[in-house]
Amino acid sequence: MYKMMTPGPTMVAPSVLKARSREFGNPDTDADFCEEYHALCRELAGLLHTDNEVYILGGEGILGLEAACASLTEPEDRVLVIDNGVFGKGFADFVRLYGGEPELYTVDGRRPVDPEALRRFLEKNHDYKYATVVHCDTPSGVLNDIATICPLLKEYGILTVVDAVASMFGEEVRVDDWQIDVVCGGSQKALSAPPGLAFVSVSAAADAAMCSRRTPIASFYCNLLTFRDYYRDKWFPYTMPISDIYGLAEAVRIVREDTGRIERHRAIASAVRTAAERAGLERYLETGDASTVTVLRVPDGLTDRQIIDGMREKYDILISGSFDVLAGKVIRLGHMGRNADTEAVAQMMGALTGTLESLGYSCGCDMEREFRAELQNFRGHGIL
Ligand SMILES: *Cc1c(COP(=O)(O)O)cnc(C)c1O
């Protein structure tokens, strides 16, 4: 099997695969399962620094985003869609699907949203039920300052919905301190479980907004209120994917015990970028790269496919291109979750050097050696 160094899905620990193969009972009727599910939701809440309810949903990360919009949006609700990337803009589609009126706040996709400019916008425009913002917008790798943006939105009484699917556990996410009403995460990114599960946290204010709707939620599967009383009633709205949840529990255990993970992500990301720049490669972003993914421009004269296929065929390492407006223009190196591992990333950088050289691009250095040398700056801090 090739090494999957993509910005999700990520490599999965053998113990997670093993946990998924555990024998299982009927999750609809087994009280033990309900307890395990509840305990796992509370653990996720702890890792996200929140007292809010957390629900694990049976579906990929996208399900959480759509469920947040389906559950909050009523016909004609005005929603501020903060857009500096593909996922950012994509929220407008979900808002529209459920009858809301998205208003796009679109800014340069090569840097994070500037909270001061947003403040000036909000001074004049703040009549929104909720706002959506992406923490790490993975196609470009930009990291938005949700620690500043969400409290700013709340000053104007706007509920906050954050897509933290690609940042969570590789970057700090503090739901209560940062006043995030709904945060969305997924199993297959920095948590390093297989794809298949989404989770959301729901604040009291978001819950109140869902409960006091004038119109019913126009979905069953995306209706977060169906989970609201699951623990009291010992009842789930649909049969929970129990094996996926066993795997998730093991992945969460690993993350919980990996206390240096945020600093390690930061060190590895920094060393990757320094090494790439020494090889003359250009970052897509001007500023604001997340620690979970590095996005590099495809050098002139090459295609993303040549680089991706070269690395896969010769080195058994899978990296990825991008999509939407960035399709063909960039390659993406994933270093999140289990892939934020110095050896795995060093090999990827060596393979990238070899592949580019074989395609006629002169790196002028060995990015693996540069990466390792750069990491020395972080050694001795107990994080690698
Ligand atoms: C991966 C990802 C998602 C979820 O997408 P899936 O197709 O369900 O994996 C949502 N938002 C962001 C920013 C992501 O990176």
Image (tube, rainbow, N blue to C red):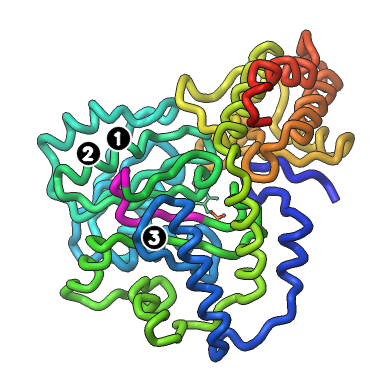
Does residue 164 show up? yes
Residue density around tag 3, few if under 14, some if 14–19, many if 20 or more, within 10 Å: many
Give the total of numbered labels. 3
Image height of 351 relative to 153, above or below: above
Q: Given contact means CB atoms under 8 Å apart, are the residues at marks 2 and 1 in contact?
A: yes
| Residue lying at 22% horizontally and 61% vertically, measured from the top left | 205
Magenta residues, start to end? 177-185
Q: Residue furthest bottom?
A: 29
Q: Is residue 292 left or right of residue 172?
A: right
Of 219 and 340, the residue lying toward us: 340
| Residue lying at 62% horizontally and 76% vertically, measured from the top left | 242
Image height of 249 relative to 225, above or below: above
* Separation (CA) of disc 2 from disc 1: 6 Å
Residue density around tag 2, few if under 14, some if 14–19, many if 20 or more, within 10 Å: many
| Residue bearing the label numbered 2 | 152
The answer to which quarter of the image holds residue 354 is: top right
Q: Secondary structure at mark 3?
A: strand
The answer to which quarter of the image holds residue 98 is: bottom left
Does residue 300 show up? no
Q: Residue furthest top?
A: 364
| Residue bearing the label numbered 3 | 201
On whether ligand 1 comes within 8 Å of the CB at mark 3, the answer is no
Q: Is residue 102 left or right of residue 262?
A: left
Q: Earlier in the sequence, mark 3 or mark 2?
A: 2
| Residue bearing the label numbered 1 | 148
Residue density around tag 1, few if under 14, some if 14–19, many if 20 or more, within 10 Å: some
On whether ligand 1 comes within 8 Å of the CB at mark 1, the answer is no
